[in-house]
Amino acid sequence: MINIFSSRSRLLLLIFTGSVVMMFGGLASQSFAQSCEQLFPSGSQVPGGYGASWNVLTTTKELLLSGVCSGNNIEVTVGSNKTNQYVYNHGFYWNGSQWRQLNLSGSNPAVGSWLAREGKGSFPKGNQSPAIFVGYVCQYSDNKWKCGCADNACTTPRWQVQAVRESSYGGGTGNPTGDLLPPPPMDNPLVVENVCPEDSRWPSNSQMAGRDVKITLPKDRVCKKVGNLGGTKSQSAHDIWVSGGELDIYSSSPSNGAGLTLTYWDGTALFEGLYIDINNSCMDGIRTYFPRSGRVIIQNSYIAGMSYCTPGTHGDLFHAQGGDGGKNITELIVQNLRGDLINQGFFVPPRPDGHGVNRLVLDHVEMRLDSRFKFSQNKISTMVFADPTGGGGNNYPPNGQSYNEVYLNWWEPWYPGTENRTNIVLPAASSFDSKGCAVYSSDVKNKAKLDGAWCKGSPPGGTFVPLDKIGRNYDRSFFAK
């Protein structure tokens, strides 16, 4: 008797991980028929929170999820046609705005909702690149059924993810990336719309505990209070999705707060379409505490006004704070972001107390000095801090750092004296090339697992984040090209 799952468990799609985004930085990937690349090829690193696209239980490591570009469709195969395999009869694909069911069929006898050996299906390619889909494979191994495996032990069943794109794919400098990671598909979420943190309807931590949460900020008004997100120490929230809206806040207190503070979550936290202005105060734009192997994605947003109060007291655009037994954020992925600030941008070096991130991906990011406010040289820090400089047992993000279309403008017209600063990002560049882009020593590049580089100045084609497309006017479709 087949003792495998009769129904799907809670969707564990924490889409994506840096494995896909690294491809955008130019890493090679395996090519398949009809000029279609599998972004999770056989033997690739298994994305956190997912099962593998390839067979972790065999020495051949054959693909279990694959796609072929065929005209306007992606033709999908789930399973590798082995007699010990059963495939759930549907998966999901991302169509640019929502998750849609991907029905599968097989040529072998079915058992209930399960297809023997393999299943095949297709979905429209549309304008999405890469095309993302998930499936679920169970295999009989070591006298037991193992499903949705991420490793040989296969103790936690997970949806298995694959993504494909045409190998001719390319992106234009100065335009937003169209390769947006999709929002997490939510399971019976707590949904709260048209709400500001100061409203009584803003959910409490206890209400968010144990839940997926979707919050949409208002389109008709500006929020004036800081917001708290996440679960409780005894019960984490799962996936959290905050979309659109504007927070315009200020605090005269030198103690750090943040526009949005996230605590106790174990899934994906997506912040998209936000306009956050801290107004020359010492608060962070977004900060986190107590991740439970959680991850953070920031997309299509403008975060401004982080400043300096006293030595050691300042606002960061994003600060991965510590706590909870040393569990760092699995990864921080930033796509289409503009930040205007005075002091410090991303502060993410890993530390033993749970501070920092295990992987950092910056994709189409522009940061500059906030010209609205006064500043001086001793207030200027680093725009990205992901380096073991200092004490406390710091190290580089162990799973690497990736920079794609990253522009940092702390130079003219506001402070020409920073022209020769190589430590505007830590790890520090050794020099700049003829285009003003950072050059790293081979030792630093290898130790920090650096992919790509950042460049001085602003994007040649203009900002990645038009302000009329975010905040209260947020239009995700503009960015998802």
Image (tube, grey):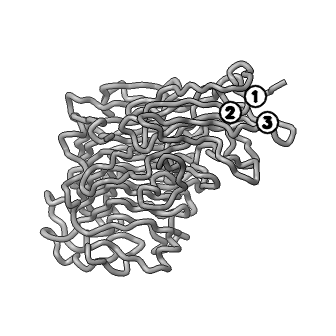
Q: Residue furthest right?
A: 143
The residue carrying mark 1 is 4
Mark 2–mark 1 distance (CA, rounded to whole Å):
15 Å
Q: Residue at left 73%, top 28%?
A: 116
Residue 173 shows in this picture: yes
Name the residue furthest top.
112
Residues tagged 2 and 1 counted as in contact (Cβ below 8 A)? no
Kind of residue indicated by mark 3: Asn
Q: Is residue 50 above or below residue 438?
A: above
- Neighbours of disc 2 within 10 Å: few (<14), some (14-19), many (20+): many
Q: Amino acid at mark 2?
A: Glu
Tell me what residue is drawn at x 16 percent, y 75 percent: 416
Q: Residue at x 43, y 39 (%)?
A: 182
Under circle 1, the secondary element is loop
Are there few (<14), some (14-19), or many (20+) residues within 10 Å of tag 3? few
Q: Nearer the viewer, residue 252 or 441?
A: 441
Q: Which residue is the site of mark 3?
A: 84
Quadrant of the frame with the N terminus? top right
| N-terminal label among 1 and 3 | 1
Residue assigned mark 2: 118
Residue 416 shown left or right of residue 452 in the figure:
left
